[in-house]
Amino acid sequence: MNILIVDDSRTIRNLLKNTLEGAGYTVCQAEDGMDALEKLSEFDPSIIITDLNMPRMNGFELVQKLRQQAKTKFIPILFLTTEGSPEVREKGREAGATGWLVKPFDATRLLNTIDRVSA
Amino acid sequence: MPKVLVFTTYDQEYAIDIGAVREIRNWVQATPIPSSPSFMEGIINIRGTVIPLVDFCKKINPSSDNGEKKAMVIIENGEKTVSFSVNNVSDIIDYDENSRKNLPDVSQGDVSTFLEGILSIEGRVIFILDIPNLIKECFH
Amino acid sequence: MNNYVETDDLESIRLIFFEECGEQLSLLEEELSSLDAATGPGEKINTIFRAVHSIKGGAGAFGMEKLVRFSHLFEAVLEKFRGGECTVDQAAIATFLKAADVLTDIVAFYRDGTDLSVQDDVVEELDRYINVPEALSKSPVSVEELPEDIEGISFTPIKIDLPKKEKFLLEITPRIGLYESGDDIRNILSFLEKKGEMEVEIHCDDLPNIEEFNVNKTYSTWNIVIFSNENKNSLEEIFEWSGDNIKVEFLEEKHVSCKLAGKIPNNFDKNKVDEFSGAQKPSRDSRKENPTIRVDTKRVDKLVDLLSELVINQGAIRSQMKVNDIRPGSALDIVISELDQLTHELQENVMAMRAHPIKTVFQRMGRIVRETSRVSGKDVILHLEGEDTEVDRSILEKLSDPLTHMVRNAIDHGLESTHLRVAAGKPAEGQLSLRAFHRSGRIIIEIEDDGAGLNCEKIHQKAISKGIINNSILMEKEEIQNLIFEPGFSTVENVSDLSGRGVGMDVVRKSISEIGGRISILTEEDKGTLFSISLPLTLAVVEGLIFRTQKQNFIVPVSGVVEAFLFQESKKFKISEDVWGYPYRDEYIPIINSENLTEKNKIETKNNSCLIIENEKKEKIALIVDEIIDQSRFVVKSIEKNYKKISGFSSATILGDGGVALIVDVDFLIESVSGKKNVRAAK
């Protein structure tokens, strides 16, 4: 199964990649929202995991964009961010996110959440 | 069985553990280095790397000028690569540990410091070189 | 399923984290230094915020508590500026810069295990922004407690019950929003299935006829019976996120209705998001346009090595062509010439891959300036120019120390104290400029201050008292200025704790010289001093003259050659026993015969040419050679790598015929004549 991870931190991307690849997923990385849109022209993810605060295009914008595109309209999108306030989470929900995880992530929880949003 | 490379210098056969030998090449004229010992032929180019070349015959016997050098043995020792010029490389032989003897206690002067032992095979007497010590002798 | 990250991988990600920290810190430094009071809550603050945020995120992942705490505090302060609650002023900028320094220190603490100095004052300064009186009612962020979102408190804690199977009855009604957020009832069902044995019943009484069917509506309700080890909380959690997008009722005896998310007020401000994202564009866009890949430097170095060999091979082809009498202009010659050109371009491009903007080093100087300024009590404004000038990595690495020292020197010794400046009619703040640019195939770095300038008389006296020079010698102004590069020289009587750290300008000159650079001074009393460093573009290739002597080839770097002309034996004259002189312009300079570079029994050859070479002190000698062959670029090969350092020669190169030629160490030759070193060449 393919997963696209979108985060401007190389550290976080690598940690995610390591955990996900260790669990047997195929991972593609993007540095921000813009990059994610580019990567999506070549990569067909089953799930997208995205950071919130990123240069060029932030997570909210990305999710809104993706929900408008036929190809990604129904792909589960998880937010993985340091922010966890109800207000921010609600914004994410409104934008169309499928789930929310708070950094630093716990591998088990991450994999569990992925499991939850993918049949 | 241990494998050694055998070469001749001064009508004496010497052996080097094959593991230390990187390659054998035809002798080339080195670029001399000023203020270096007489046995230093200079520096040569081995595939883009500059390495020192020691005249093995002169190292054994400083006063000698024993004619034609035909080959260079390139040796890897730790981080460094060095080379020795010799008269002739004869062969590579496997030997039985039993045919290897310790050096006789009689001091042989300078040479003994970089000899490890003696091989006697079919009447031949071959000196086994102690490479780390030889290199220490030449380059320090 | 493998839930853990391998230790090796973790270690390598740790390294990536530190590398990234470095990048974020220099970005931070860069943005902060261009920040001014006119900066509103716009893109700059955003970029700064993000840099700190990014460090915090990674630090959290590695459990670097100190780093998390401090970056969180810093971030919280920045948030105030981002949101417009606070406005940027000089004091804020100063605090930010200090905070950035502390951040750098904490990163170094985790990376290198360096000592961590006390940062209480900075923490206090930051706290002041958070604990503003009107905000006192809000819970202040204290550095003592870990921030909530870092601990992941937003997850409801799970009670662990004894593994006892319980029966749950659920009624689930998905709304269209569930599908619109990329979820699916199938996901939920298959996930629930993993929680225990399950029975599912679908109620589709509401399903309309096909012609009335609306794809934007949901019609079905699912009744589920599940026997699970999980407790109710953990089952509820499955639906938590989906909020209103799914209606879930836990039936069972108690008929608990589950309204977990409830109605969350809609305070989503669209304008704010737009401004937020739009504002981020300008600062980073230009940089992001060219996609980059990360390559191990070893691979690039290997490429450089291979190219060197290609260049050598090219030379070999050339010499073979000569041997085989292939005329210039022949078809083969043309093809080979094109190949030469391509190789040359290839080489330049590969060299460019090793190049880095000097920015990284310059930015470090920002901190040095602040520190020095603080300790010396002199206000300094640093101006940076040409930060994007690219310098070979190997040179860049060795540039930081000498520059640091020179910057400290410029502030400590160059700039006057504030009251002296004001008295002299200068602006109270000292102006320090760092510039980098290309000039005729070399990189020039300038360090200029508008201080008092070098006092020649003082330097001269000092040098005499230190025994560096003899007072009977008459010296040119320029020569006197260059005395500051002599070992053990210091012009300030009370050695301050800044530049007087046991290293002098002699060390600076030596380290610059080691990377093939030269340093010169331009100074005017009361106006200031300009140090100019000239560096080669690369250390891998040297532009040199190849000459022949005693039938042996040598290279002398063109950077050390002033002039070359025909040698006239008759003009040479004897100075003393071993020393000969030769007229050059309006002076007489000592001669070195290049045959001394060789060891062989001398053969009778004719000295045809004379090379005037000079060192960075502008001392000149005449090097007499048999024949100058050519000027070309030579690949530098280390002799020490497999042998040892040879005095008189800096390194070697490989010629077209595969032979090795020694590259002359100009400084050493000249010093040998000045009698400072007892060299063979002087015999």
Image (cartoon, coloured by chain):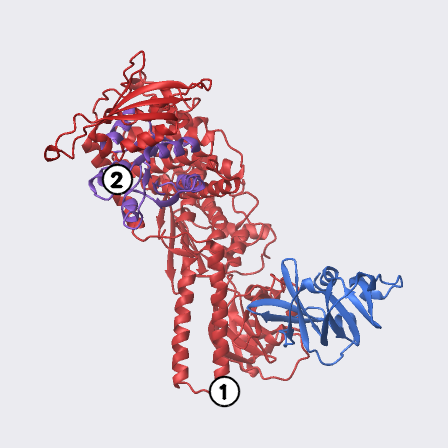
Which residue is at a point 71% across and 80% down the rendered structure image?
Answer: B68
Residue on which disc 1 sits: C324
Residue C636 seen by the camera = yes
| Element class at badge 2 | helix
> In front here: A6 or B112?
A6
Residue type pointed to by label 2 = Leu
Q: What chain letter is assigned to the residue under label 1? A: C
Number of the label disc, if any, that sits on residue C541: none
Specify whether B15 is left or right of A85.
Answer: right
> In front here: B102 or C362?
B102
The image quarter in which residue C170 lies: top left
Chain letter, colour red in render: C
Chain letter, colour purple in render: A
Number of the label disc, if any, that sits on residue A62: 2
Chain B: drawing colour? blue
Specify whether C370 is left or right of C176.
Answer: right
Instruction: Look at the numbered discs 1 and 2 and tell me whether their residues touch, using CB distance below 8 Å.
Output: no
Mark 1 → mark 2, Cα distance in angstroms: 67 Å
Above or below B41: residue C143: above
Estimate the x, y position of residue C296 in percent, counting from the top left.
46, 53
Q: Residues within 10 Å of mark 1 (few under 14, many from 20)?
A: few
